[in-house]
Image (tube, rainbow, N blue to C red):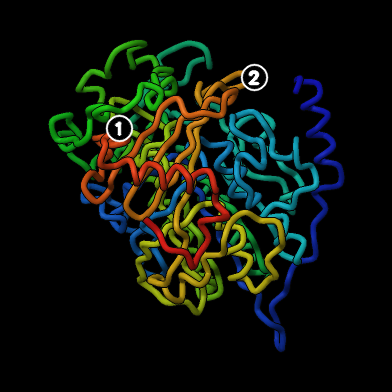
Amino acid sequence: MTAMKRRSFLKTLGAGALSLAFPVVSGAGQRRSPNVLFIAVDDLRGTLGCLGDEIAVTPNMDTLAGEGTGFLNAYCQQAVCNPSRASVITGLRPDTLKVWDLKTHFREHHPSIVTLPQYFKQHGYYSQSFGKVLHGQGAPSTDPPSWSAEPVWDHCSKREQYVLPENRPGEKSGKQAAAECADVPDEAYIDGKVAAQAVKKIEELAEKRWAFFLAVGFRKPHLPCAAPKKYWDMYERETFENDRWPALNRPKDGPDIALHNWKELRGYTDIPDIGPVPPEKAAEVRHGYYAATSYTDAQIGKLVGALERLRLRENTIICLWSDHGFHLGEHTIWCKTSNYEFDARVPLIISAPHKKRGQVCRRLVELVDMYPTLVELAGLSVPGGLEGTSMAPLLDDPQRGWKRAAFTQFPRPAYYKKSFDVMGCAIRTEQFHYIEWIDVKTKQPTAIELYDHQADPYELTNLAQREQQQPVVRELGQRLREGWKAALPNSSSV
């Protein structure tokens, strides 16, 4: 799509889209519609105490998990911002949306689609976004039909994510380091501003007694790993040194195509263009990632605290999720854009009124499941045509039988321009992670990976060529080709 066509496309989307729907008012004799607080965190891997991370300082997310259900095996559909967020917001998978890159808007191929916030808006809710909810730049960051009012802080340049003068020159010049530590208050950085604006809106809506769907997206711990000094001070640098960090070697017998050159991190001026990250810098970036995670955790605490202070907590569904995981040097790579567990597995916490608290669910779930889940929890009819499965039953019984598998994919080249050559298609069962790198022309796999998570949770040994594993390879290959519909609940699993 040319720049001119894209502008025209977005102008069409915006026509008449911002008219405010009638809000749901809670009053005497009326059913109280539950509010929805939809919290997105950018690039957050399983660095939460409630997910078993022994380093992370995340008291607010841990408390939220204690008040709801924490999903230990939740998977994104594609480990990069735009495809993952498009899948979440539409309830459709990347292949259906034809969204695999950072530039394609999900309405290009599905102009009349009704998004999750749009569906709530159609049912009388006030819907608005704060921060990064859709992709953070270009056409995919904008979707006027989804919202009752203009988004706040939905766009943010890289320069705006720093506070130190040496990191704030022109966009194309200057230092712009991969991490920043500044002795400043929370609201000096973008996520502090987002939290403050969202709290202000919650206060306004509480006074007006409007039911709301508020989507609040935090950019950290996405690069640059920038956070106030007090969050850096929560950790010791030695904790993040290479000799204390696991899984730094590439997987034994793993294919080259599964790896990448971590273009995203190399875009910062203190990171070498080729070769490994120097050990001192690697420790600094990891330290910054955890500091930024704790910073975001504090902002989430402000949102939940506002709900409690305004007596809205008991009638609000809170869903906290990350768009994908992140590598911190594991497998010799950094950032996302792979099918490995570090990228595919994500934090997911749901706390809903009248549901059990403090539950842990180990069943396989996917981010595409959030659309029908939130609709059902709000007491609305789940629309047809969605490609996810409502997780609401798991909030009542987290041990019940569930999906046989979760599905993730990623193309190569990772950042393609017009088309990709190979699509990596992955199926995750309770025990195995199986990946085929499929040539788009021949439809045949060019490489295969198989990891046994019972014996190898860090995915350090590819078993796909081992003779004794061939029955598993054949079965999982068949199940991968059968697709997600064949993996729905009430089936046995490998």
Q: Is residue 87 above or below residue 212?
A: above
Give the number of the mark in front: 2 or 1. 1
| Residue at 26% across, 55% down | 52
Query: Which amino acid type corresponds to the residue marked 1 in the rendered image?
Result: Gln
- Residue located beneath label 2 in the image: 418
Q: Circle 1 — which element? A: loop
Q: Nearer the viewer, residue 87 or 187?
A: 87
CA gap between label 2 and label 1 equals 33 Å
Residue drawn at (40%, 43%) of the image: 474
Q: Which mark is first along the chain, 1 or 2?
A: 2
Which numbered marker is on residue 134? none
In this rendering, does residue 54 appear at all? Answer: yes
Instruction: Give the side of residue 86 with respect to residue 63, left or right.
Output: right
Left or right of residue 374: residue 445: left
Label 1: how many residues lie within 10 Å, few (<14), some (14-19) or many (20+)? few
Determine the residue positioned at 47% across, 67% down: 351
Where is residue 304? Give x, y as percent. Answer: 46, 62
> Which amino acid does the dot numbered 2 rest on?
Lys
Residue 242 in percent (x, y) is at: 17, 29
**Quadrant that contains the C terminus:** bottom left
Which of 189 and 316 lies nearest the eye of the viewer?
Answer: 316
Which is more toward the observer, 146 or 428? 428
Q: Quadrant of residue 8?
A: top right
Residue 256 on image: x %, y %: 36, 21
Where is residue 485? Give x, y as percent: 58, 55
The quarter of the picture where residue 279 lies is top left
| Most foreground residue, 332 or 192 | 332
Q: Seen in the image, is 226 located left or right of residue 452?
A: right
Q: Which residue is mark 1?
A: 465
Q: Residues within 10 Å of mark 2 (few under 14, many from 20)?
A: few
